[in-house]
Amino acid sequence: MNLTFMNDEQKRVFEEQYKKIMIIGIAITASVFLYVFIAFLPLSTNSEAANIMQLRYTFLAIALFVAFAIRIIRSTIIRKVENPDFKNLINRLTVSSIITFSLCESIAILGFVEYFMTGIMMDLYIMIFLSLVFSVVHFPRKSHWEAYINQNLRGFSQ
């Protein structure tokens, strides 16, 4: 994709902001592996909790809700804007990416909390797997950012 509707300063800001988001995204995604490490520490878990299956399904339902919410929230934040300017567009992409990373990580956190409530390690693995899959699927792609900015700036300039 070509940044045809940006001047040199905007291209520089775009590249810097995208690199920052890449670092934030990688850091948040990598932190998910910390939960697995902590789960292996010898801590006591409450495996005697009443209605463990109900608790497991509740946490899974919340994780699936978060997965669907990611899509809705992202599209709400980056929807086409009236009278866009470059700074506003970059800010929307940045906020959208950080919120998406946080929501993806929250799925792993749910698995982590559930593990300590039920003692079932497999659920932690499932939630971490889902978290990583959603992180990869929703990881910001430079071409998508460029297309979004070009589309909005082009639509405004015409």
Image (cartoon, rainbow, N blue to C red):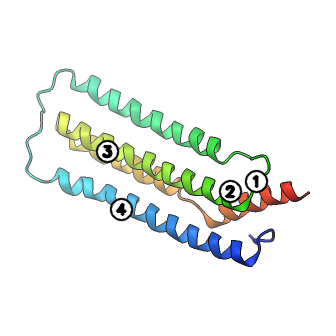
Q: Residues within 10 Å of mark 2 (few under 14, many from 20)?
A: many
How far separated are the C-alphas under marks 1 and 2?
A: 7 Å
Task: Report the residue marked by disc 3.
Answer: 109
Q: Residue at x 70, y 71 (%)?
A: 10
Label 2 or label 4, whichever comes before in sequence order: 4
Q: Residue at x 18, y 50 (%)?
A: 39
User: What amino acid type is highlighted by mark number 2?
Assistant: Leu
Asked whether the beta carbons under mark 1 and mark 2 sit within 8 Å of each other, the answer is yes
Asked whether the beta carbons under mark 4 and mark 3 sit within 8 Å of each other, the answer is no
User: What amino acid type is highlighted by mark number 4?
Assistant: Ala
Task: Report the residue marked by disc 1.
Answer: 84
How far separated are the C-alphas under marks 4 and 3?
A: 13 Å
How far separated are the C-alphas under marks 3 and 1?
A: 36 Å
Q: Give the number of callouts.
A: 4
Left or right: 73 in relation to 89 = left
Label 1 or label 2, whichever comes before in sequence order: 1
Q: Residue at x 78, y 46 (%)?
A: 82
Q: Position of residue 103 (x, y in %)?
A: 44, 45
Task: Report the residue marked by disc 2.
Answer: 89
Asked whether the beta carbons under mark 1 and mark 4 sit within 8 Å of each other, the answer is no
Asked whether the beta carbons under mark 3 and mark 1 sit within 8 Å of each other, the answer is no
How far separated are the C-alphas under marks 1 and 4?
A: 34 Å
How far separated are the C-alphas under marks 2 and 4?
A: 27 Å
The quadrant in which residue 4 appears is bottom right
Q: Is residue 152 above or below residue 21?
A: above
For residue 30, the mark is 4
User: What amino acid type is highlighted by mark number 3?
Assistant: Ile
Numbered disc 4: secondary structure? helix
